[in-house]
Image: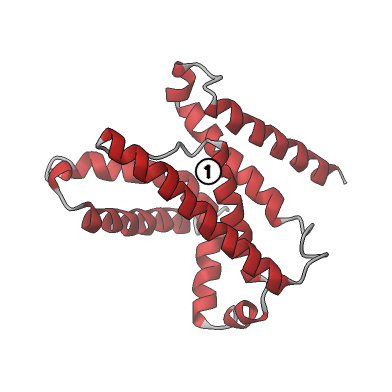
C-alpha cells in the first residue's frame, strides 16, 4: 500500500542522510543548527518505525533463534565498538572519544539492539509479563518514549545550564552524576508529556 511504500522511501532517505552526515557532506553551519539536531534524530525514528512494522524475518525464522542471533550480534557489535574504537582512540588522545550518533557503525548497532528488543517482545515470556504490573509500567513508558526522545535534550540542557551555577561538573564523579541526570531528565520529560497528553481538548 501507499503508506508502506512511503515509509520505505523515507527509510532509504534516512540511511542515506546518516551516511552523508558521516562523510561531512553538509555545511558546518547546518550541522550546528537546531534543524540539523531534530532532523538528524528523526532519521532514527523513521528507521525504527520501518523495522517495528515489518515482520520480514519473523515469518521465516523461529522467534527463539531470532532472539539468540540478534542478542549475540548486539553484544558482539557493541563490544567491538568499545574495544576497537572507544578504548584505543580515547587512550591515544587522553580523552573520552566516541562515534557520532549519525554514523553507519552506530546505525548498525542501534538496529541490531532494536531488533533484539523487538524479537524479545514477541516471546511467550514477555507477553505473559505484559499482564503484570511491570508490563503496565513498560507499556506506559513505551507510550511516551518517542516524546521523551524528542524533548529530553532540551530538558537536559536547561537542567545543566541551571545547575552549573552551583555544581562544578568537570570535577565531579561522572559515575554518580550521569545516572542522576538520566533519572531526573527522564522523570521531567515524562511529566511534561503526561501533562500535555492530559490537557483537555475541548
Quadrant position of residue 59: bottom right
Q: Is residue 167 visible?
A: no
Image coloring type? secondary structure
**Image: 161 above or below 144:** above
Name the residue rendered at 69%, 52% in the picture. 51
Quadrant position of residue 26: top right
Return the x and y of residue 11 as percentages of the image width and height: 70, 40
Whether residue 159 sits left or right of residue 63 in the image: it is left
Whether residue 10 sits left or right of residue 5 in the image: it is left
- Tell me the element at label 1: helix
Q: Which residue is mark 1?
A: 106
Q: Is residue 122 visible?
A: yes
**Image: 97 above or below 24:** below
Mark 1 neighbour density, 10 Å: few (under 14) some (14–19) many (20 or more):
some
Name the residue rendered at 35%, 45% in the picture. 87
Return the x and y of residue 24 as percentages of the image width and height: 52, 22
Quadrant position of residue 97: top left
**Image: 100 above or below 50:** above
Return the x and y of residue 134 as percentages of the image width and height: 49, 78
Return the x and y of residue 177 as percentages of the image width and height: 23, 54
| Nearest the eye: 4 or 172 | 172
Name the residue rendered at 57%, 38% in the picture. 104
Name the residue rendered at 71%, 49% in the picture. 50
- Tally of numbered discs: 1
| Nearest the eye: 192 or 122 | 122
Amino acid at each position: 500500500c501507499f503508506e508502506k511504500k512511503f515509509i520505505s522511501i523515507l527509510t532509504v532517505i534516512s540511511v542515506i542522510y546518516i551516511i552523508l552526515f558521516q562523510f561531512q557532506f553538509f555545511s558546518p553551519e547546518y550541522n550546528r543548527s537546531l534543524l540539523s539536531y531534530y532532523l538528524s534524530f528523526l532519521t532514527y525514528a523513521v528507521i525504527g518505525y520501518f523495522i517495528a512494522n515489518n515482520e520480514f524475518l519473523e515469518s521465516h525464522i523461529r522467534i527463539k533463534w531470532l532472539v539468540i542471533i540478534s542478542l549475540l550480534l548486539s553484544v558482539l557489535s557493541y563490544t567491538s565498538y568499545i574495544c576497537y574504537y572507544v578504548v584505543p582512540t580515547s587512550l591515544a588522545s587522553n580523552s573520552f572519544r566516541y562515534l557520532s550518533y549519525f554514523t553507519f557503525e552506530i546505525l548498525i548497532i542501534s538496529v541490531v539492539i532494536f531488533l533484539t528488543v523487538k524479537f524479545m517482545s514477541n516471546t511467550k515470556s514477555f507477553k505473559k509479563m505484559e499482564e503484570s504490573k511491570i508490563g503496565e509500567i513498560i507499556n506506559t513508558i513505551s507510550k511516551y518514549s518517542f516524546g521523551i526522545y524528542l524533548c529530553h535534550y532540551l530538558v537536559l540542557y536547561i537542567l545543566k545550564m541551571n545547575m552549573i551555577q552551583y555544581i562544578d561538573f568537570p570535577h565531579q564523579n561522572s559515575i554518580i552524576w550521569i545516572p542522576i541526570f538520566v533519572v531526573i531528565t527522564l522523570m521531567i520529560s515524562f511529566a511534561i508529556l503526561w501533562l500535555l497528553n492530559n490537557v483537555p481538548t475541548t
